[in-house]
Amino acid sequence: MERPLRQPIARKPSKRTETLPTNPLTEWTLTVERLQALASQWQGRRVLVVGDLMLDEYIVGNAERISPEAPVPVILCERRTYGAGGAANTAMNLLTLGAQVVLCGVIGNDWAGEKLRAILGEAGIDTTGVLTDPSRPTTVKTRIVAQSQQVARVDVESRMPLNGSLEASLRGIAKELGRDCAAIVVSDYAKGVVTESLCGGLRELKGQTLLTAGPKPSHLAHFAGFDYLSLNRSEASAAVNNRATSVTEVGETLSARLEVCGLVITLGGDGCALFCDGRLVAQLPALRVQVYDVAGAGDTFLAALTLALVAGASFVEAAQVATVAAAAVVRKSGVATTDVTEMATLLKSVG
């Protein structure tokens, strides 16, 4: 699918710097051969994605003049493109990495829902678990781009929790679909689909299938007892009400509180920090690539982390695989995906 071109993002030094403890596991160990071996193990594995589904819309054109009605540019639309966003982007990333993907979520009874369902179906994603709620719109993120620069974004969404009967239906379908999957990935964007009841139902499958998630801070307690969680720095800090003074303190607090097997805090250009049993076990460096757009990179990281774990990788090794995948997509404009061939090429070029 065509994406609007964007200029590289100029990265400024972070205002917050932190020296994490030196640990032998911070050394990069993933090789191209090991990546390919793991990928051969996850190919064709069945994964369920549950969460907030979105349609990404791009309106691309030229800013010809300033509006006489207000000091804003008038954009002459040249084309519109559409893609899968939110939990649907996580599903697309799993698919391009080689998994069989089943999707579970909610769309509205509208053109955007039909468009998203068509995109997913054409890609080969099983939408058996995608339910329609006539009372809410399909979430749409419309990005307006002129002269290769995003000038505005318009969101259409409902953040209200699902009604009781629909929530119960989604919970039942997700549990039933999840029984036959190697992993369940919950992609939470706080749009009303991911609830305590839904996560509780999925947690009943722990031990039968791997449970991973990318939670929003307000819902973090829902994911206690999952296997692996991934948050970015700002989400992790918000989850402890910004009271912790360092990434290490945040991660150790959350890891102990949530009783998960592993917690990842992604740190952008600083890589990621890994926590188990309330302690920091590793900090991995980021791969040095030209960054164009970070939108959707968290979905890619979570998808690759999950598949590597399914393939038998250690936590640290799986995070290295996820780091390579995320580095591959931030080099592209718009919400994007990657595949094993591209990841291997990237790893070889920076190794």
Image (cartoon, rainbow, N blue to C red):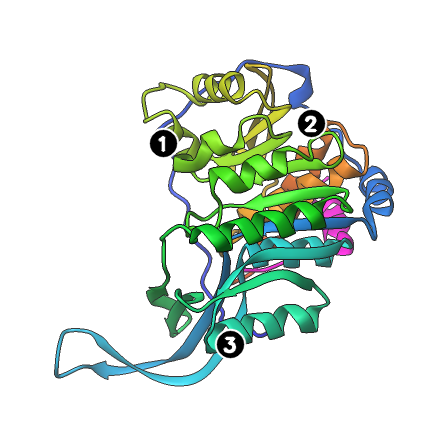
Q: Residue at x 67, y 62 (%)?
A: 128
Q: Amino acid under label 1? A: Ala
Magenta: main secondary structure equals helix
Q: Residue at x 58, y 60 (%)?
A: 336
Q: Residue at x 50, y 36 (%)?
A: 231
Which residue position holds label 2?
Answer: 316
In the image, is residue 57 above or below residue 15?
Answer: below
Which mark lies nearer to you, 2 or 1? 1
Which mark lies nearer to you, 1 or 3? 1
Residue 324 appears in the picture as rendered:
no
Which residue position holds label 1?
Answer: 238
- Counting residues from the start of the chain, the first of labels 2 and 3 encountered is 3
Give the image location of residue 157, x and y in percent. 37, 61
* Residue 309 found in image quarter: top right
Q: Residue at x 62, y 39 (%)?
A: 202
Residue bounds of the magenta highlight: 334-351
Secondary structure at numbered mark 3: strand
Instruction: Report the disc number at residue 154.
Output: none
Which residue position holds label 3?
Answer: 81
Q: Are marks 2 and 1 in contact (CB under 8 Å)?
A: no
Secondary structure at numbered mark 2: helix
* Residue 245 found in image quarter: top left
